[in-house]
Amino acid sequence: MNKHHGEIIERTIRRNGYSITDLSRTINVNRRSMYNWFSQPKLRRDIILKIGKALNYDFSFEFPELFSTEDFHTTTPLVPTVQKDNNITDLESVTYWKEKYIQVLEEYNRVLKEINSSKTTRHKSRGKTIKTRSFL
């Protein structure tokens, strides 16, 4: 079974919560290049090594035929390491915005009811009750 290098690297990056934008800046490549690499079934050894060192991640487990553990554990890092995104996770983000949407929708409906009830007013004119509607 052949390994798809790009998919393995992309999955590792996403699973560990690294920012692709930050990673591309760290290794001085265009973000589009990163996505192109993800679609490549085979990647050059130096590209995988550069990504691994930037992430401080040992790809020797995924690619034992290309690397040894020592390849990723040097005393001086090749590039500054990329920090994990500490933002809200995807699921928390979806939940947050769903709850926010419901809250805003409920508030909108409440205000709409208030406006609707104030549009229909009763006026007394010469002893008669007249129902009027204002159109805004």
Image (spheres, rainbow, N blue to C red):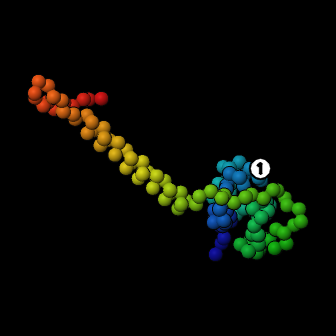
Asked if residue 47 can be seen in this view, the reply is no
Residue 27: x, y in percent? 77, 53
Q: Check the picture and name the quadrant holding the N terminus.
A: bottom right
Residue 79 shown left or right of residue 43 in the figure: right
Q: Check the picture and name the quadrant holding the C terminus.
A: top left
**Amino acid type for the residue under numbered disc 1:** Asn
Residue 120 shown left or right of residue 18 in the figure: left
Residue 6: x, y in percent? 66, 62
* Outermost top residue: 126
In the foreground, 28 or 129: 129
In the foreground, 94 or 74: 94
Q: Is residue 72 above or below residue 107?
A: below
The residue indicated by pointer 1 is: 28
* Outermost front residue: 127
Q: Quadrant of residue 15?
A: bottom right
* Outermost left residue: 127
Q: Quadrant of residue 116?
A: top left
* Outermost right residue: 75
Which residue sits at x=66%, y=70%?
3
Residue 86 shown left or right of residue 26 in the figure: left
Which residue sits at x=15%, y=28%?
124
Asked if residue 112 can be seen in this view, the reply is yes
Q: Quadrant of residue 36?
A: bottom right
Callout 1: few (<14), some (14-19), or many (20+) C-alpha neighbours within 10 Å?
A: few
In the foreground, 24 or 106: 106
Residue 135 shown left or right of residue 131 in the figure: right
Residue 8: x, y in percent? 66, 67
Total numbered labels placed on residues in the image: 1
Which residue sits at x=85%, y=72%?
70
Q: Secondary structure at mark 1?
A: loop
Residue 4: x, y in percent? 65, 67
Which residue sits at x=30%, y=38%?
115
